[in-house]
Image: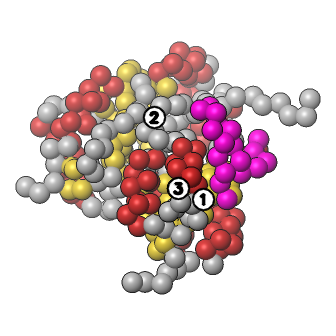
Amino acid sequence: MKKIRIEGIKLSEELFQLNILRHFHSKDTLRHFCRILASNKINIPFLSTAYFGEEVQLVCCMSAEQKAKVQDLINAEASLGGCVEFIPSTGLLSVYPHKSDVRVLGLSLFALGRARIPIHGLASSLSALTLVTDYGRLDEAAEVLQEYLELPPGQRPFRPQFRITQSEIVKGR
Amino acid sequence: MSDKQLILVVDDDPDLVEAVCMKLESEDYRVAKAYDGVQAWEKIKEEKPKLVILDVMMPNKNGYQVCDEIKQSPEYKDITVILLTAVGEAVTTTRYMHRDGITTLADDFIPKPIDLDKLMEIVKGYAG
């Protein structure tokens, strides 16, 4: 089988995943939740929402270093009680560009499934297909994908060499 | 051979590359894409673009290094380089001293998050 040519596979740092499922006033609750994260300067490298009638499910991933802080914020938010699930030590694997080729999605799911590598979430953006899996198996996941997806010569899956964080900048003092 | 100007867009954020390329194509430019500094330099040698839109913070080879190589090359020094920088508020010049102690001279810069209309103004100013 001929491999599909892609340009890159990007792997993330260690994250944790947070799933929220709500039934009533869920859109307001989720908006409120995102505002809490933003006001605490917590970056969200992965965010996906799904709507099922009146139900809304939110899946997001944040830096593993911020898990305790996020847990404290969740515990302080009564409206989220009982509908939050944490998955520790997850990572993102992004394949790009997908060029809207559904085979990239199908073969990625097939390859990871055959290797029994879990998929905790997935999303497609303008150019990238991003899968959430166990952080400890990211390199293995990238390897099995390359049985079907071909990187340019000399290219390897890579991790960002820096992290962008939010900080307080005081001007004009 | 098309007479449309070729613009190379380089960023390790594939969605940003795609969005900028869609905008450029809608303005009748040809586009090439690269996702890190090494790929960028290969594309420059292969396709010799008129202009490069170049992110600064990238894996393998950063934007400053690529810009240095372009501007120090007799063959490619006339290629226009527009840097994309996330530290735009602190930047008042296109001449940067980076950590390797090398000064880089780009032709222009635009801060992130990118205003696509502003970017197109800059591109048209250099590439017509």
Q: Quadrant of residue A113?
A: top left
The image shows a total of numbered marks equal to 3
Q: Nearer the viewer, residue A153 or A92?
A: A153
Residue receiving disc 1: B81
Residue B34 is situated, as x and y percent measured from the top left of the image, at 42, 55
Q: Which mark is residue A160?
A: 2
Circle nearer the viewer, 3 or 1 = 3
Q: Which mark is residue B73?
A: 3
Q: Quadrant of residue A91?
A: top left
Query: In this rendering, do the residues under marks 2 and 3 share a single chain?
Result: no
Q: Amino acid at mark 1?
A: Val
Disc 3, SS: loop
Q: CA distance from mark 2 to mark 1?
A: 23 Å
Q: Earlier in the sequence, mark 3 or mark 1?
A: 3
> Is A113 displayed left or right of B101 in the figure?
left
Q: Amino acid at mark 3?
A: Ser
Which portion, as a residue range, is magenta?
Answer: B90-107
Q: Nearer the viewer, residue B58 or A141?
A: B58
Question: Is A111 part of what is drawn in magenta?
Answer: no
Q: Amino acid at mark 2?
A: Pro
Residue beneath the point at 16% across and 48% down: A148
